[in-house]
Image (tube, rainbow, N blue to C red):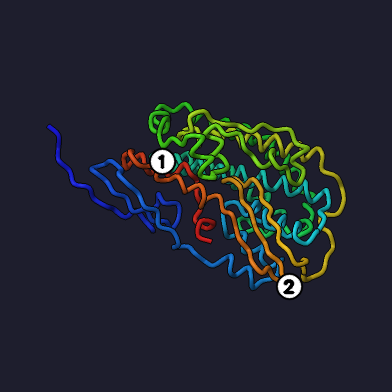
């Protein structure tokens, strides 16, 4: 006999473990079934773009650390690339290689977090997450060698990086690159064929390729839907045009594909870092410049393939020591635009996992 139910609206968050930060979802349920959702942003808003108008071009680097705070290196790179384009600052070859090494290490660290927490939301309490944190810690050790910090790094500067890598960095990086494929294999074997993981993630929260393109999605979410778009290939920056690597894509666009694309991308990142180690030349790591950068009047946009998608900075200069305007294209915000399409029709337990597969960080959603 069918049981008559009444729709009910429930607030999830802004303080809820499954919301990946201070994010609120108003969800209308009929029993366990999701009828509608309304995302509510703004609880972590810190006025980053407005603050940038009051700081010098170098001081803004520290603001970018706090956007996607598990991917500071790529945040730094996107911003300094925009300043270099605006002010016409050249970058030494050695600095370009160091930036690519840091970006790919950061991609692995970010994907480790995404993978570990997805399994946490599936109910695999702690073990996969601790495995992922173990590997991430070794990457943070390398970042500490480079700049003395582990999370909010501020390592990059317009015209290069703050300092060259110390001698002990290179053998440590070699050892990590030797070990990392084994770590990725371990996670892959632990998760990818797991019966529960397959049952809960395959064909769940599907995003069709047409919808992903129309929604301006980017990063692993877009590629999981079968769209082969990666800025490192489509519009190469730094030294990516000298690297040989593949762009993995999915076939269904479901939660499983979004998970598995990140596993494959970690393997490609290891390939890129190994090539950088072989190719990096000796030389300076930063172009000397004035203490206060005064770009000519004009505007510039630069973007990078961050772990969560296309991260871009649009800067407008009036000739002063601070940008007249700073606008950030944050992939976490844009990748949420199809959240309703992903969640409606699924049950509450599925909703948490589908939402987790988007891998958002609220620091860059609420800029």
Depicted 260 relative to depicted 171: above or below: above
What's the residue at 70%, 34% (across, down)? 271
Quick one: label 1, few (<14), some, or many (20+) residues within 10 Å? many
Image location (x, y in percent) of residue 159 = 79, 58
What's the residue at 18%, 46% (across, down)? 6
On the image, numbered disc 2 is attached to which residue?
320
Q: Residue 333: give its label.
A: none
Image location (x, y in percent) of residue 237 = 74, 46
Secondary structure type for disc 1:
helix
| Residue positioned most to the left | 1
Q: In the figure, residue 48 lies in which quadrant?
A: bottom right
Q: In the figure, residue 134 lies in which quadrant?
A: top right
On the image, numbered disc 1 is attached to which residue?
342
What's the residue at 33%, 53% (across, down)? 26
Q: In the figure, residue 355 lies in which quadrant?
A: top left
Q: Can residue 125 be seen in this view?
A: no
Q: In the picture provided, is 213 more to the left or to the right than 24?
A: right
Quick one: label 2, few (<14), some, or many (20+) residues within 10 Å? some
What's the residue at 83%, 59% (across, down)? 287
């Amino acid at each position: 006999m069918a049981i008559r139910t009444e729709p009910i609206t429930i607030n999830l968050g802004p303080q809820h473990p499954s919301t990946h930060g201070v994010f609120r979802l108003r969800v209308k349920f009929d029993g366990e079934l999701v009828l509608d959702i309304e995302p509510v942003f703004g609880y972590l808003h810190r006025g980053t773009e407005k603050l940038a108008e009051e700081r010098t071009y170098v001081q803004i680097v520290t603001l970018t650390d706090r956007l996607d705070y598990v991917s500071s290196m790529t945040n730094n790179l996107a911003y300094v690339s925009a300043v270099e384009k605006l002010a016409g600052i050249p970058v030494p070859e050695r600095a370009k290689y160091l930036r690519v090494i840091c970006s790919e290490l950061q991609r692995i660290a970010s994907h480790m977090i995404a993978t570990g927490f997805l399994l946490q939301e599936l109910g695999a309490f702690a073990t996969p997450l601790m495995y992922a944190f173990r590997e991430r810690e070794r990457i943070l050790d390398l970042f500490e060698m480079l700049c003395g910090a582990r999370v909010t790094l501020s390592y990059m500067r317009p015209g290069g990086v703050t300092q060259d890598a110390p001698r002990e960095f290179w053998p440590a990086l070699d050892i990590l690159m030797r070990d990392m494929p084994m770590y990725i294999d371990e996670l892959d074997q632990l998760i990818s064929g797991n019966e529960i993981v397959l049952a809960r993630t395959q064909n769940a929260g599907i995003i069709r390729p047409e919808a992903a393109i129309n929604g301006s999605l980017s990063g692993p979410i877009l590629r999981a839907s079968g769209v082969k778009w990666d800025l490192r290939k489509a519009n190469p920056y730094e030294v990516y045009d000298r690297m040989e690597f593949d762009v993995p894509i999915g076939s269904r666009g479901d939660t499983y594909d979004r998970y598995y694309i990140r596993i494959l991308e970690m393997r490609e990142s290891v390939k890129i870092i190994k090539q950088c180690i072989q190719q990096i030349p000796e030389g300076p790591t930063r172009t000397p410049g004035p203490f206060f950068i005064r770009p000519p009047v004009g505007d510039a946009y630069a973007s990078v393939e961050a772990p969560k998608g296309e991260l871009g900075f649009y800067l407008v200069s009036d000739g002063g020591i601070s940008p007249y305007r700073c606008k950030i294209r944050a992939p976490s915000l844009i990748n949420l635009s199809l959240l309703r399409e992903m969640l409606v029709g699924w049950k509450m337990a599925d909703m948490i996992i589908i939402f987790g597969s988007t891998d958002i960080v609220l620091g860059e959603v609420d800029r």
